[in-house]
Image (tube, helix red, strand yellow):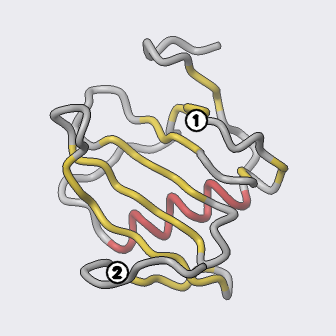
């Protein structure tokens, strides 16, 4: 099953195709940046303008390691720009696929 791309942007990072888009969250007042790999192994959600820059990993892999597919939150080591750009989307993808320095946080924004 492929990813819906209508109204969304494609980006190629490291030879892999990703789809990214920002949308208003149904359950909160925040806009969320969504990034999904073409094979759906990497699924990221990054809340925008929240005060604490973090990303939620929901896929099968994160930072080149198998993930449990649950919603795991990690602090970002760099700020989220306003507005979100393709350069930031690429930076986030590279960090989520190649680095290994993610700091987990609980849902109340405290490091675990």
Quadrant location of the C terminus in the rendered image: top right
Q: Reading the chain from its start, which is encountered first: label 2 or label 1?
A: 2
Binning the other alpha carbons within 10 Å of mark 2 as few (below 14), some (14 to 19) or many (20 upward) gives few
Image position, residue 67 (x, y; %): 77, 44
- Circle 2 or circle 1, nearest the eye: 1
Between residue 19 and residue 103, name the one nearer to us: 19
Q: Say which residue appears at 75% left-offset and 54% top-offset.
A: 61
The numbered disc on residue 61 is none
Would you name the residue on which mark 2 appears? 9
Would you name the residue on which mark 1 appears? 71
Rendering quarter of residue 101: top right
Indicate the secondary structure of the residue bearing disc 2. Answer: strand
Label total for image: 2
Q: Say which residue appears at 22% left-offset and 38% top-offset.
A: 49
- The image shows residue 9, relative to residue 68, as above or below, that is below
For the residues labelled 2 and 1, the Cα–Cα distance comes to 23 Å
């Amino acid at each position: 099953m492929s990813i819906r791309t209508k109204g969304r942007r494609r980006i190629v990072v490291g030879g892999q195709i990703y789809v990214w888009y920002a949308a208003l969250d149904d359950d909160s007042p925040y806009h969320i940046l969504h990034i999904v790999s073409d094979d759906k192994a990497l699924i990221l959600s990054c809340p925008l303008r929240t005060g604490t820059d973090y990303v939620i990993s929901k896929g099968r892999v994160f930072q080149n390691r198998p993930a449990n597919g649950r919603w795991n939150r990690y602090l970002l080591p760099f700020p989220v720009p306003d507005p979100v750009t393709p350069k930031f989307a690429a930076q986030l993808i590279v960090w989520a696929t190649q680095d290994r320095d993610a700091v987990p946080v609980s849902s109340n924004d405290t490091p675990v």
